[in-house]
Amino acid sequence: MAARHELAFEWVHLSHKEPSAFVETYGFSGNQGAINLEGIRITPVGKPSDTLLVFMHPASTLQLLPVPRAAAQLGAHVLCAGSRYQRNDTAAILEKVLLDLGAYIRHAREVWGYTHVVLVGWSGGGSLTLFYQAQAERPTITHTPAGDPIDLATCGLMQADAIIFQAAHISRARLLLDIIDPSVRAEHDPDELDPQLNLYDPRNPNQPPYDAGFIATYRAAQLARVRRISAWAKERLEYLRKKGGSEMERGFVTHRTLADPRFLDPALDPNGRRPGWCYLGHPETVNNGPVGLARFSTLRSWLSQWSVDDSQGDGLKAAATLRAPLLVIENSADDAVPATHPRLIFDAAGSTDKRFAVIKGATHYYAGQPQLLDESTNLIRAWLLDRGLLSE
């Protein structure tokens, strides 16, 4: 068992130039011709390392969560890297998040002098890390899904040395497709609902355990709703372009985005999750609450993040082209990520050096599970040691 270390925390500020047709985020990001990024580097006191573990989530900050701290306590150098959209993904463009992650990796190698960089994709960071590494290894993207130019082939994204995919999902778009509420009949009115598809309506004759026919109908209705919103977003963007003038973007609200039958029926894609509950609390409360996925979005952001037919941040496609070593960790009682997602990523991965592991009984956040957090952290440490990416 590795010794535990006292931790030092360092605030990190990076700035990289980027011209922008309009300001996307409120505050000092993009309105001066530059993107300002903030992160926290966590290091074990008195223990140097030539390897940096980089955690990034498209829209969240991770330094307050237990996973990065646990890695640092066991001797790893860790960077919790915030994107330009941290704490507010309303306008997030995934392709631009790759530029932010690339700026951190370049800084880690060229300024801090780390020899090795390992991307740790926890939760929503999982598909992001795969997306980044795929574009760093074989860049293909020249435009966002909205048609805006962003040439990832010429921006010099540096490759990571290994990828860890931990308690993570396939993509933001795929996750939303799995959980969006298809009972919504009118996007402007969250109370105009189809009771036959409303999981939370006691009048609905379809109650758990759900039969296969209902699930097939439900999933088809979810896809139809996502596609209606995507078609509307494209139509609005085209309208703004044809209209001319200075108006370039619009924001909108998507009501009811957490109604996955799996949260109510534990027999669907079974794992050890708590029935009638999810990582954000009671599913019905979250469904139309203020913190739901995709609740607030712009037209461009919807296409980049949430449209399953348009988003380029597809973890399965990215994994298929992967060359770097890959460790996939499934938490067997995950109450956020569908149980099928980690295995699908592992099976799709093109890496010749890949491993799949399960932390039995672990929930998404390891809440009240310090022993299981230790198990996963020691697993990661051993895997890195075996590949010469971490020293004793």
Image: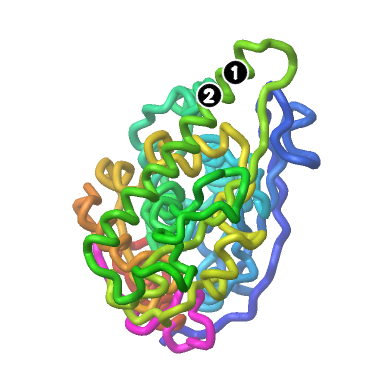
- In the rendered image, residue 13, in percent from the top left (x then y), is placed at 72, 48
Visible residue check, residue 118? no
Residue 70 seen: yes
Look at the picture and state if 258 lies above or below 74: above
Residue bearing mark 1: 239
Q: Secondary structure at mark 1?
A: helix
Q: Residue at x 20, y 56 (%)?
A: 347
The boundaries of the magenta stretch are 355-372
- Mark 2, secondary structure of its residue: helix
- Residue at image coords 45%, 78%: 276
Mark 2, Cα crowd under 10 Å, few <14 / some 14-19 / many 20+, is few
**What residue sits 50% from the left and 87% below the top?**
370
Amino acid under label 2? Answer: Glu
Q: Quadrant of residue 209?
A: bottom left
Q: Which residue is mark 2?
A: 235
Which of these two is toward me, 69 or 171?
Answer: 171
In the displayed structure, would residue 24 be above or below residue 238?
A: below
